Amino acid sequence: MISRGPLLEAVTQALATIRSHPLRAALAALAMAAAVGTMALVSSGLDGLARYARDTGARAFGADTFVVTKIAAGGLSRRELADRLARNPDIRRGDVRFLDRFADRRVLYAPVVQRAGDVSAGGRRFENAAVSGTTAELFDIRELGIVRGRFLTRDEEDRAAAVTVIGADIADALFPGTDPLGQRVRIGGRGFEVIGVQARQGTAGGVSLDRYAWIPLTTHERVLGATPSLLVFAKSPNADGTLAAEDRAHATMRARRHQRPGQPDAFDIITPEAARGFVAELSTRVEGAAIPISIMALLAAVVVVTNTTLVSVAQRTREIGVRRAVGATRASVVLETLAESSLVGLGGGALGLAGAWAATALVTGLAGVPVGLAPATGVLSLAAAIVSGVAAGWYPARRAAAIDVIAAIRQD
């Protein structure tokens, strides 16, 4: 085991060498910084992608939520879509009542219908808002982020009350600088009282989640007319009952459609696994390309640090010979050379982490994507930089230890 004395001496000598040739050391450190920065950004980007997908999915879809719908059109061929259009009837209020009747307190259901429409107040107008009719149960199913006021109640649904909860974009456009609560807006030619305002939700799949105007489903039908089919958001009241809730909803809908065993479903169920599977597949593809890039960047950095350390050894040949002549051992020469390359690697790694941290902070601030540099990522990146520095210095260290003392002293 190396004692502290030789190790401290090696580090001191390495720092002196780096200070005497700062440009050479800086170029090697920059190569290592690029490699470490790439590794950190790849890891942070993958983590941020998964976290962003989870968060936006929870806002747009709901955590542990599934949806009973007429057709889940994603990934279908034209023929499959045509077959389902012919086979699957619309989902109507009677279907929702049937689901509720056999929910047995194991599933919460909330029908949702949506149409594009204008929302106005005074002389201001917000065009193409997502005017959505639903029931009070949606508040227990989806993360709606009500920041002021409240959501719809069952009494308001029963009375077809003219009340609405609006998204952040609508609130900012119609009531700039004022509190929207208690204000009046017009939807479909009818006046509505604003009873709630959502916090800013961002986007999901490129679609803004801040353009919603939520109104009771019964009011939606009276003001905007009946719609062909409903979406039914559903969730288990218990966190561990999601699969059982999906099975119950599936069996109940098959019973509602009077389907025999072996017949294909006359409806579709969209589960959270579909979105999570897409994110996992995307992350796997990105990681599959990013890992070789990171490895190649590290190898390139090792080559650069190796070359600069070899140059350092060549320039200090006479110095190494003199030190060997006055008692320095081969082990101390090896240790000093490894210390030099390791310090360059460590400095470059720290610089790369600083750059990665700045880049992630910029992305988070400008794009709103929660990309952060995790402590574990920082530790692993620095460890990779040090190991790469040691690997880069091994061959130059062996060359330095093998220098002929007499020939080195005679060198000009």
Image (cartoon, rainbow, N blue to C red):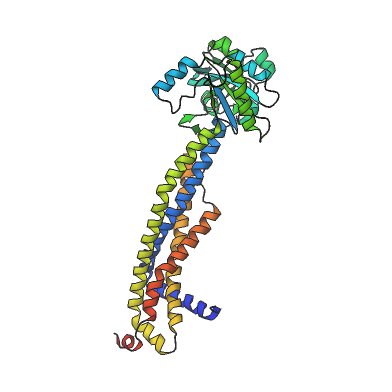
- The residue drawn where x is 43% and y is 77% is 334
Decide: is 269 above or below 404: above
* Residue closer to the observer: 230 or 12: 230
- The residue drawn where x is 35% and y is 65% is 304
Percent of width and height locating residue 85: 46, 17
In the image, 24: left or right of 213? Answer: left
Name the residue at the left extreme.
Answer: 412
Decide: is 44 above or below 384: above
In the image, 99: left or right of 393? Answer: right
Quadrant assignment, res 18: bottom left
* Residue closer to the observer: 298 or 273: 273
Give the total of numbered labels: 0
* Residue closer to the observer: 267 or 348: 267
Quadrant where the image shows the C terminus: bottom left
Quadrant where the image shows the N terminus: bottom right
Percent of width and height locating residue 149: 65, 26
Residue 326 visible in the current orientation: yes
- The residue drawn where x is 43% and y is 62% is 348
Decide: is 200 above or below 352: above
* Residue closer to the observer: 46 or 174: 46
Percent of width and height locating residue 134: 60, 19
- The residue drawn where x is 43% and y is 80% is 333
Decide: is 391 above or below 109: below
Residue 195 visible in the current orientation: no
Percent of width and height locating residue 192: 60, 16
In the image, 411: left or right of 237? Answer: left
